[in-house]
Amino acid sequence: MSRLAQMKAIALAFLLGAIALLVLAQHFGRHGIWGWIGAFAEAATVGALADWFAVVALFRHPLGLPIPHTAIIPRNKARIADALARFVADNFLAPEQILKRVDEWNPALRLGEFLSTPERLEQLSRQLQAWARQSLTALDSPAFERELLAMARSQLQHWNVAKTASQLLHILTRGGHHQKVLNAGLSQIAAWMGQPGVRDFITEKLIVMARREFPKLTWLADKLDYTEDLAVSLSTRLANAIVDELQEVLETPDHPLRQRYGAEAMRLIDALDDDPQLQERIAAFKQKLIDSPELQDYVRGLWRQLRDWLHADLARDDSTSMQQFRHYAERLGKRLRDDPEWQRNANEQLRIAGEHIATQLRAIAPTYIRQTVDAWDTRFLVDEIERSVGRDLQFIRLNGTLIGGLAGLLLYALLQLSFLR
């Protein structure tokens, strides 16, 4: 027997006891002590019946009779849903309440204290490691690979490559960064041209070209053993000339090559923004790349390598990824714990996020609550509410029986005093 059923049985026993006392008092004529017992029993019976009616009327029609203003909860389910929705929205999701809690709680400091405590951080990392392993196992399926590939294709389909390239070039040219890129490239070329191996390569190519284009001249040079010396001399002069030209470009801000380079960059930006043919060619190349089996195999292989590495790493007690997590989490925790400025900034971001989330939830939560309550079966709703508060309501019946009986005794005493006068 449930606790609710036990309390109902006790309340019923009180009612039956009051009725039994009333019957006995009537049987003995309600004289002497039986008059007092009868007064108590009569008022107690009325009180017990009245409170039984009141309690039952909350949940259903007493005795199944359709008495007006009974079965209050079933008849007012919609009003209950509206009231509950307003209560939750006004008292739990009000932005000012959320912000007040953030200010009082100082979550940044508490997070910092948590993360800077080694035992707590270790426990958190172990929980995250277990969660990550479970999640990774759930993702280890061909269906997820297909979904991942479809997601990658979708993202690439919606990616405007021409616009992205134009934006990147705008960023580079806005601050003159494209000239810095040119400087870096020219410096690398100059350093490369100065390497002995490069000059040997140029010498070999010059000899091959000369023998192909000028066979008679190179035949004569070979007879004089002058071909290699001539090629070395030419390659050295060519390399030095290229290096000198590169150095001049590097040292001259308004060099014609720089100006042409800047003009070509601006023309490319304009073409990326306004040339439909160039945009179509870029889009066609992108689509060809998306449809290529090589890209699909690459994405699958990349995911499998990452998955296998994570599987192996997370299975170890000395997981590299978890060590990195603990390292950075501990640094963050100490910073949040010890630096008031970090605390203020973090709390301010939490306030902004909390206000935004509360505003969004406050807009949708009432509708969700109303729809959920409206969808509940009425009998289920009544049973759940009665199961939650019904036991306490039975105490109302007990109190009604006792208080009614005491009130009956008081009235009987007052009547006896009036008769004595």
Image (cartoon, rainbow, N blue to C red):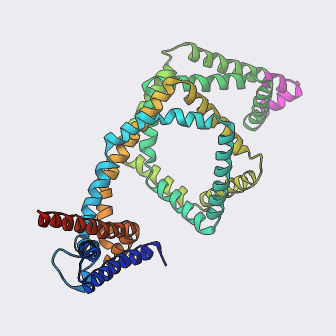
Relative to 22, does residue 234 appear above or below in the rendering? above
- Quarter occupied by residue 242: top right
Residue 357 covered by magenta stretch: no
- Quarter occupied by residue 411: bottom left
Relative to 227, does residue 26 appear above or below in the rendering? below
In the depicted view, which residue is nearer to us: 83 or 309? 83
Where in the figure is residue 70, as x and y percent of width and height? 21, 75
In the depicted view, which residue is nearer to us: 351 or 73? 73
Q: Residue at x 70, y 22 (%)?
A: 191
**351 left or right, relative to 40:** right
Q: Residue at x 54, y 24 (%)?
A: 339
**348 left or right, relative to 65:** right
Relative to 416, does residue 234 appear above or below in the rendering? above
Where in the figure is residue 353, as x and y percent of width and height? 40, 41
Read off the magenta span.
216-232
**166 left or right, relative to 211:** left
Kindly give the residue lying farthest to the top in the view shown: 251
Query: Would residue 322 be visible to someone looking at this image?
Result: yes
Q: Quadrant of the C terminus?
A: bottom left
Where in the figure is residue 15, as x and y percent of width and height? 32, 77
